[in-house]
Amino acid sequence: MSSASSITTAISKVKLKNSLKTHTITETLLQDICDQLKAGIPFIEKLRCQPELTELVANIVWNSVPSSQTAIDKENLALQILTKIFDLDAQEIDTVKGQIQYGVDNGLIRTVPLIQRTVTRIFHFFLKKLGLKST
């Protein structure tokens, strides 16, 4: 067994707390959301600084961050995701910050209640099992 794999095994057995837990959740979400966006939206590079994409990313972040993680700055995480995808410059970062703030202030970015997400998932599961939904 290599040294790296033994360290990974040891880390997986330890419960992370406080800033380590926050860091782990933030970095995992950052990577997962970036990967999903790149895979799910063809030619995403053409959507640089588009308000609709900014709103989509922010809504994904707002609904992906566990409610118990109040230490995670959702606005900053959304900005980090877009910066990682597009390598934004300072002016574009200010533009995206403004788009996120506008969405928050005007109710375009919000968390969907857990019960609504659960009911929707169950509904789609049964539709799929009944053959009424192709995906």
Image (tube, helix red, strand yellow):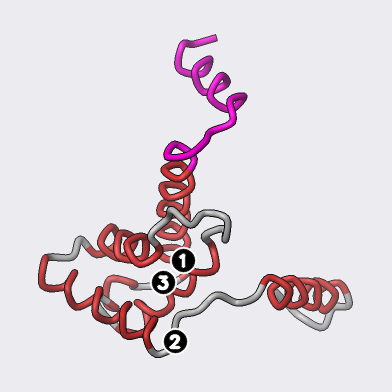
Question: For the residue labelled by badge 1, is the local secondary structure a helix, a strand or a loop?
Answer: helix
Residue 61 percent across, percent down from the top left: 46, 66
Residue that numbered label 3 is attached to: 57
State how far apart marks 3 and 1 are (Cα).
Answer: 6 Å
Of callouts 2 and 1, the N-terminal one: 1
Q: Earlier in the sequence, mark 3 or mark 2?
A: 3
Amino acid type, callout 1: Val
**Mark 3 or 2, which is nearer the eye?**
2
Which quarter of the image is occupied by the C terminus?
bottom right
Horizontal and vertical percent position of residue 2:
49, 11
- Residue linked to disc 1: 61
Q: Classify 127 as above or below 70.
A: below
The answer for how far apart the CA atoms under marks 2 and 1 are is: 13 Å
Residue sitting at x 74%, y 71%: 118
Q: Quadrant of residue 108?
A: bottom left
* Magenta stretch, residue numbers: 1-21
At x 43% / y 50%, what residue is drawn? 26
> Relative to residue 87, is residue 132 drawn left or right?
right
- Residue that protrudes farthest toward the right in the picture: 130
